[in-house]
């Protein structure tokens, strides 16, 4: 690990002692390799690179990489994001909607979809998002670190819709 010593009090405390107060020096670091529900949508090169990286980390002394999936609550992350994002876009960019040539077709469509979302649907999505975050916090408490794909591949072109992407989780 790069960050060491008491000069970094938060990370030093977290990495030096376990939850039971015992030293972490005598146990391997548990690292989660998260294969989210977006994994099948990822480009082959991205999957291969992450798996290769995980094998490299797992081979390090004192590291144990565990392939796992995040809690089920995260499977709805994209739908929740869409509701929250579209309602927010509709609210904050409403004045720009009057001048459509200043916005991309995707943004215009998001504004239209956001206008149709009721306040109750928006509040439910926020509540579900909070529940998913709590579930993820509980899940990650079993690990010292976690890594996953940040994107499923290269960025889409201007006129293309983004594929299901882990960065939106």
Image: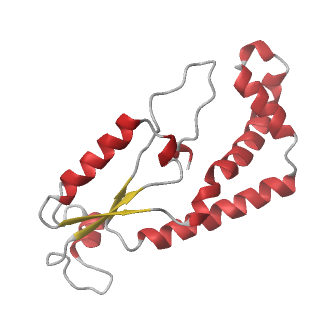
Of the pair 24 and 109, the residue shown nearer to us:
109
Image coordinates for residue 62, horizontal then vertical, percent: 15, 67
| Residue 21 % position (x, y) | 27, 85
Residue drawn at x 29%, y 71% is 14
Q: How many marks?
A: 0
30 over 43 or under it: above or below? below
Which residue sits at x=78%, y=28%? 109
Residue 56: x %, y % from top left: 19, 51
Task: Quadrant for the N terminus, please.
Answer: bottom left
Instruction: Name which quarter of the figure residue 22 lies in.
Output: bottom left
Task: State left or right for residue 37 relative to residue 80.
Answer: left
- Is residue 121 left or right of 12 when viewed as pictured? right
Depth check: 29 or 152 in front? 152
Query: Farthest left residue?
Result: 61
Residue drawn at x 18%, y 77% is 27
Answer above or below: position of 48 versus 9. Answer: above
Give residue 89's position: percent from left, percent from top: 73, 36
Q: Is residue 11 left or right of residue 80?
A: left
Is residue 80 depicted above or below 87 in this figure? below
Q: Quadrant of residue 95?
A: top right
Q: How is the image coloured?
A: secondary structure
Which residue is at a point 49% across and 63% down the rendered structure image? 70
- Judging depth in this view, the residue of 102 and 30 nearest the camera is 30
- Examine the rendered structure and indicate whether residue 21 appears above or below residue 59: below
């Amino acid at each position: 690990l790069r960050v060491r010593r008491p000069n970094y009090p938060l990370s030093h405390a977290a990495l030096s002692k376990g939850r039971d107060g015992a030293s972490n020096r005598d146990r391997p670091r548990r690292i989660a390799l998260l294969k989210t529900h977006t994994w099948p949508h990822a480009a082959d090169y991205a999957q291969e690179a992450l798996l290769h990286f995980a094998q490299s980390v797992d081979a390090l002394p004192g590291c144990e990489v565990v392939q796992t999936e995040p809690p089920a609550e995260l499977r709805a992350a994209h739908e929740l994001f869409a509701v929250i994002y579209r309602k927010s876009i509709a609210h904050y960019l409403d004045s720009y909607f009057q001048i459509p040539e200043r916005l991309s077709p995707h943004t215009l469509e998001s504004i239209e979809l956001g206008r149709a979302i009721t306040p109750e649907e928006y509040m439910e999505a926020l509540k579900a998002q909070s529940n998913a975050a709590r579930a993820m916090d509980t899940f990650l408490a079993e690990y010292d670190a976690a890594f996953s794909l940040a994107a499923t591949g290269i960025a889409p072109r201007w006129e293309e819709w983004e594929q299901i992407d882990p960065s939106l989780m």
